[in-house]
Amino acid sequence: GAVVSQHPSRVICKSGTSVKIECRSLDFQATTMFWYRQFPKKSLMLMATSNEGSKATYEQGVEKDKFLINHASLTLSTLTVTSAHPEDSSFYICSALYGGEQFFGPGTRLTVL
Amino acid sequence: GEDVEQSLFLSVREGDSSVINCTYTDSSSTYLYWYKQEPGAGLQLLTYIFSNMDMKQDQRLTVLLNKKDKHLSLRIADTQTGDSAIYFCAERANQGGKLIFGQGTELSVKP
């Protein structure tokens, strides 16, 4: 139980385009989901906390207009990287809260050319 | 502020024990975790310990917590090549709260 999926697993896009990443809780409902960013050989950096039916809470230094988060249902949160640039290339990981614990998705590798 | 520190690399021979260390600064940490990340994959929860415990053992994994020194360790007995991965420790102050991760320790297991 407590399985989290992400889609796509890998995406390559051109500079200036927008990319949407989905995070789904497959066998449970998650009121709260988290979005992390991981640079190569680095730790996970929390970007924002996504709450179903309300606005996401962004961490300091994360641009909310750049990284749009929507948590429209209890099993789905989306992260849209708007007007992506090469510096946005990274590994994005989501997690979903269940029973007080975070369960992580497999991650999405974004490469912006 | 909250900070979690780990050494970056550890190399062991297959069959040996591995010990990965972690220190944290937040004395209100209630839950401490160890996660494993294989290349290109998400995080897999290995084990966790509550702050009122000193030790927890789960098959080949042993977690030791020294709350006074704010030191956490993960021992992997009989390390196998499949254990090669990055191991993250993380702490959290309360249930459902934000996780603070260490930098990750890259474990390399040589045959």
Image (cartoon, rainbow, N blue to C red):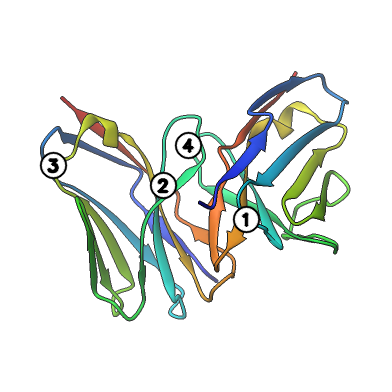
Neighbours of disc 3 within 10 Å: few (<14), some (14-19), many (20+): some
- Residues under numbered marks 2 and 4 in contact, where contact means CB atoms less than 8 Å apart: yes
In this view, B14 is above or below B26: above
The CA distance from mark 2 to mark 3 is 21 Å
The amino acid sitting under disc 2 is: Gly
Image label count = 4
Horizontal side of residue B108 vs B40, given as left or right: left
Residue that mark 2 sits on: B104
The CA distance from mark 1 to mark 2 is 29 Å
Residue that mark 4 sits on: A41
The CA distance from mark 2 to mark 4 is 8 Å
The amino acid sitting under disc 4 is: Lys
**Residue found at the very far left of the displayed protein:** B15
Dot 3: what SS?
A: loop
| Labels 3, 1: front one | 1
The CA distance from mark 4 to mark 1 is 31 Å
In this view, B51 is above or below A18: below
Q: Quadrant of residue A84?
A: top right
How far across and down, in percent of the image, does residue A101 sit? Answer: 52, 63
Residue that mark 3 sits on: B78
Share a chain, discs 3 and 1? no
- Residues under numbered marks 2 and 3 in contact, where contact means CB atoms less than 8 Å apart: no
Residue at 30 percent of width and 34 percent of height = B84
Q: Name the mark on residue B41.
A: none
Neighbours of disc 4 within 10 Å: few (<14), some (14-19), many (20+): few
The amino acid sitting under disc 3 is: Asp
| Labels 2, 3: front one | 3
Horizontal side of residue B20 vs B48, given as left or right: left
